[in-house]
Amino acid sequence: MSLMSKLDNLDLRLLLELVRDPRAQVSELSELLGVARNTAQSRIRRLLRAGTVRHGGREIDLEALGYDVIAFLTIEVVHRELDGVIAGLRTLSQVLEVHEISGRGDVWCRVTATDTHNLQAALRSVLRIKGVIRTETVLALHEHIPYRTEPLLERLAQKPADTPRSTDHS
């Protein structure tokens, strides 16, 4: 039985509020969601133990929500339609992040799906956005290093205080 089948509406609303404000206090969350403080606290503990909530509440394990597929899309767009394409991508809930890029293609985005059929439907939605010429999709097979900033911050923190900070080109 997957964790998603164990998550109820309260768990999902709690996750949403934690993503919106990872520093929210349990008392704020319980008031916002209309539940007892102990209920909110026990739900948060369960989500943390299960690994559904990671990195202080800002990151959610998508697999725990039933989204097992991650894909990276490179999108070629009609340049005068770029703003409209970005706006269209913003409306698709399965689009996790979007970057304007150089090189092959114009836009790169990370998309999630429950399975390949769901991914195909999401890709069709992307292709229907006015200004999208074509897409290229690459599936992620395994995440070895999740998005992180800690090593960069550790390196910057090790520099002497009087050393000017510069862009690291190594």
Image (cartoon, rainbow, N blue to C red):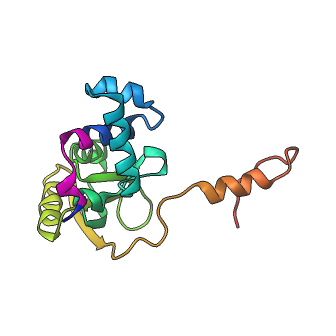
Instruction: Give the position of the N terminus as an image quadrant.
Output: bottom left
Q: Residue furthest right?
A: 162
Judge from the rendering whether residue 25 lies leftward or rightward of residue 14; answer left or right. right
The answer to whether one can see residue 109 in this image is yes
Judge from the rendering whether residue 137 lies leftward or rightward of residue 53; answer left or right. left
**x and y percentages locating residue 103 in the rendered image:** 43, 66
Residue at 22% x, 50% y is: 7
Magenta span: predominant SS is helix
Quadrant position of residue 90: top left
**x and y percentages locating residue 85 in the rendered image:** 25, 47
- Relative to 17, does residue 69 appear above or below in the rendering? below
**x and y percentages locating residue 141 in the rendered image:** 33, 76
Q: Residue furthest front?
A: 38
Residue at 30% x, 73% y is: 138
- Relative to 23, does residue 92 appear above or below in the rendering? below
Residue at 25% x, 56% y is: 65
**x and y percentages locating residue 157 in the rendered image:** 75, 50
Q: In this orientation, which residue lies closer to the viewer: 32 or 121? A: 32
Judge from the rendering whether residue 108 lies leftward or rightward of residue 124; answer left or right. right
Q: In this orientation, which residue lies closer to the viewer: 44 or 101? A: 44
In magenta segment, residue 8: yes
Q: Which residues are magenta?
A: 3-12
Quadrant position of residue 39: top left
Instruction: Give the position of the C terminus as an image quadrant.
Output: bottom right
The answer to whether one can see residue 166 in this image is no
User: Exactly how many numbered labels are in the figure?
Assistant: 0
Quadrant position of residue 162: top right
- Relative to 79, does residue 170 appear above or below in the rendering? below
In magenta segment, residue 112: no
Q: In this orientation, which residue lies closer to the viewer: 162 or 8? A: 8
Judge from the rendering whether residue 156 lies leftward or rightward of residue 7; answer left or right. right
Residue at 70% x, 55% y is: 154
